[in-house]
Structure formats: structure tokens, C-alpha cells
């Protein structure tokens, strides 16, 4: 039996009071308050879905470092080569 995995942002969701459920091997936030309250919040402001668990990439080669620097908005060099909340900026 495989252990349920946690999202990279699990602790952030937990601090916000998320109620979690298991989905496809991941413990994901289901809701924070009531469905109606969240519906109104999204209609009045914005809703965000955490997709941090949905993709893994292996980038290899002599130009991999420079490639990552060019596509990550936070930059790869300023994080000393360690991934940390990296966002792609494909245009």
C-alpha cells in the first residue's frame, strides 16, 4: 500500500484551515469554510487551485541551468540552484 503524498504547499493550506481529502494518492485541500461562502468569495474576488503536485520535469544537458534561468520567473540562480516555488514564464 502506498502512502498518501502531501502537496508542497500542505502546511500553508493547513494554516489557512483547510479540510483535506485523499485524491489520486495525494492529500489535497477540499475546502476552507462552507461551500456557499467559498462560492461567494470566488465570485467576488478570485479562486486558486494548487497544481503544485501535477507535474514533474527532468531537465538535463549542458545548457539545462541556463534554460531554467530563462523560464523561471523567480530565477534559478538567486535560489542557488534549489527549486523553491518556481513559476514558469513561457511566452
Image (cartoon, grey):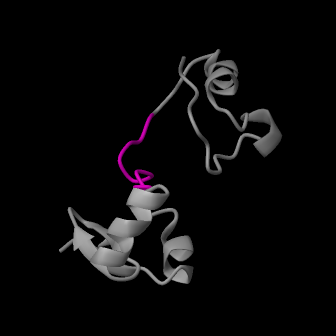
Image quadrant for the N terminus?
bottom left
Query: Residue sitting at 24 percent across and 73 percent down?
Result: 22
Of the pair 4 and 38, the residue shown nearer to us = 38
Q: Quadrant of residue 80?
A: top right
The answer to whether any part of residue 53 appears in the image is yes
Total label count?
A: 0
Residue 41, image x and y in percent?
43, 67
For the question of whether residue 5 can be seen, the reply is: no
Q: Is residue 6 above or below residue 63?
A: below
Q: Is residue 52 magenta?
A: yes
Residue 48 percent coordinates (x, y): 44, 55
Residue 49: name its quadrant.
Answer: bottom left
Please tell me which residue is depicted at 49% across the width and 73% down the height of the picture.
Answer: 13
Choose between 58 and 72: the one closer to the eye: 72
Residue drawn at 56 percent across, 72 percent down = 12
Give the magenta part as a residue range: 48-57
Q: In this rendered view, identify the residue nearer to me: 4 or 41.
A: 41
Image height of 6 relative to 14, above or below? above
Q: Is residue 86 left or right of residue 37?
A: right
Q: Position of residue 68 (x, y in %)?
A: 63, 26
Q: Look at the magenta stretch and give its main secondary structure.
A: loop
Residue at image x 54%, y 75%?
11
Left or right: 77 in relation to 1: right
Quarter placement of the C terminus: top right
Residue 46: percent from the left, percent from the top? Answer: 47, 55
Please say if 3 is above or below 48.
below
Would residue 60 be counted in the magenta stretch?
Answer: no
Amino acid at each position: 500500500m502506498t502512502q498518501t503524498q502531501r502537496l508542497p504547499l500542505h502546511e500553508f493550506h493547513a494554516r489557512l484551515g483547510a479540510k483535506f481529502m485523499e485524491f489520486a494518492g495525494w492529500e489535497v485541500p477540499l475546502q476552507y469554510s462552507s461551500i456557499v461562502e467559498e462560492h461567494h468569495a470566488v465570485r467576488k474576488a478570485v479562486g486558486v487551485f494548487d497544481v503544485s503536485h501535477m507535474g514533474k520535469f527532468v531537465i538535463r544537458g549542458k545548457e539545462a541551468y541556463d534554460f531554467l534561468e530563462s523560464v523561471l520567473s523567480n530565477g534559478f540562480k538567486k535560489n542557488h540552484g534549489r527549486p523553491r516555488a518556481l513559476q514558469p514564464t513561457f511566452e
